[in-house]
Amino acid sequence: MRGSIEIQPVIKQLREYTNGNYTVKIYEDGTKIRENNKDYFDPEVPESLDVKITNKCDLLCAWCHECSTPYGKHCDPDTLLNKLSTLPRGVEIAIGGGNPFEHPDLSYILACLKHFGLICNITFNERHFEQYSCLIQRFIDEKLIYGYGISCNRSFSQNLHEIIHEHCSSDRACVIPHLIAGINTNRDIERAITIYGKCLILGFKQYGRGSAIYSSDYSIREQITATKEHLAKLLQMGIVSFDNLAIGQLDVKNHLTDKQWSEMYMGDDGDYSIYYNAVKDYFKKNSIASQNIKATDAVKAFKNIGTIK
Amino acid sequence: MYQIRRGVFETNSSSSHSITIDRDKDNLTDFPKGQFIRNYPTLKVPGVSGVSGVSGVLEMRGGEFGWGVEDFNDFETKFQYLVTHIFRNCTSESEVLSRMEDSEQFLMLKTVIKKTCDLEITPPEPSAYGKTYVGPVGYIDHQSVGTAFQVFISKEILKNYLFNKNSILFIDNDNY
């Protein structure tokens, strides 16, 4: 008779930093912990920035709230880097667009942000994966990118996971499918959770091209209602994240106890995260907020957004 | 104050991952003190209610390991396996208490559990001797005795063995 023990690799801590009156720890699987011995958090800098680096994209999705087009402009890389250079090591940068791979200086931008000690993540559409798989592989190998958000289309591809494994050594990459309430069906969401073990559900933005399609396509409202009614089952299937818009549209809070909510709710837009449109060089509390903020850097923008909330 | 976003990086292109719900808490990278019981509501901890307990004790009971072909990834079985390993040669209560003072492996186990989930490890009540598996009736097959040493290489490895559901204790036999 014999016994043996198999020990999984420890999830390593990537970064730890002090932000105002608390500490932030980030682990290599994306887990983030805020902690202090007080009953409130008082941040001095944003923990994350959602950064739009280009408005160029060839997909022309009917619901794109950024109104990206094949003729969209790119940001100036040096202006972007200057704005983000004052952030402390460990802050997360969510790179998006448009199609961020269209930006000719993407590699340079990522290399500089890595040099700053920032943790870069990127979001792109699943239909662009194969075209840019070699570039993605290089980003993984060089640890330029940690998290990969993949926007899933209306007809969610079951083969994407296999394609990712075929093209990339994705064991070091953290992939999370993005699905939109009202666009993706419950079946799409279930498939995503089954394949990846997790997903991010975004609220439907009645903004940009999303405004027109919401008015003309009544099925979006019906689908949001269907997802709301199906939510309890989805939450049992794996890790499910929501943005603030989806929290409201799907009544997520109703599925949680007060204790769970206080531990897992990461705050309103603008409390710990801000949006930076690097193409037009302004900040907002999120991508659909009405008020633009001009600031010399992201830390000052975060403080300004805090004062106007 | 303590808040956690589990298992995802911030990838949203418009606003933050505002909440991340993971019903399966077994793969946590860390536990806030006092919340261990809530994360393991099925853990049978004497004297502590299943949900609201913020501190408590973890009783050593040991177990019989070596006769079956089984895999375990739950905390309690993996913990009791180590207890049986550490106290396998004890023949009396006094020996158990003495080893609790002297054994470096037990002190490491005690430290990791206290730091991770704020529980104290307690010996069995004296009246429980003969009814529990700790002490003379605790059993690890002789070919498996060395197996547990590897988890005591560091506190980090020990913590990962105990609290990561993907760390598995395999009990096998060579009778086939």
Image (cartoon, grey):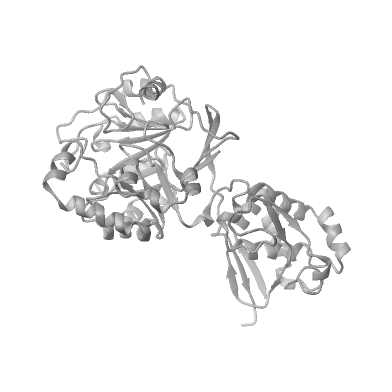
**In the figure, B174 relative to B124: above or below?**
below
Judged from this view, the residue extending furthest toward the left is A216
Instruction: Pick the quarter of the image with the N terminus of chain A.
Output: bottom right
What residue is rendered at 79% in x and 67% in y? B88
- Residue B143 showing in the rendered view: yes
Quarter of image, res A71: top left
What residue is rendered at 67% in x and 78% in y? B67
How many marks are shown on the rendered structure? 0
Judged from this view, the residue extending furthest toward the bottom is B176
Could you tell me residue A273's position as x and y percent? 39, 32
Left or right: residue B120 compared with residue A263: right
What residue is rendered at 58% in x and 70% in y? B71
**In the figure, A222 relative to A85: above or below?**
below
Judged from this view, the residue extending furthest toward the top is A296
Could you tell me residue B69's position as x and y percent? 60, 76
Quarter of image, res A125: top left
Left or right: residue B156 compared with residue A202: right
Seen from the viewer's position, the closer of residues A52 and A133 is A52
Seen from the viewer's position, the closer of residues B91 and B51 is B51
- Residue A30 showing in the rendered view: no
Could you tell me residue A10's position as x and y percent? 56, 50
Instruction: Pick the quarter of the image with the C terminus of chain A.
Output: top left
Quarter of image, res B85: bottom right
Left or right: residue B167 compared with residue A130: right
Could you tell me residue A100's position as x and y percent? 27, 36
**In the figure, B12 relative to B164: above or below?**
above
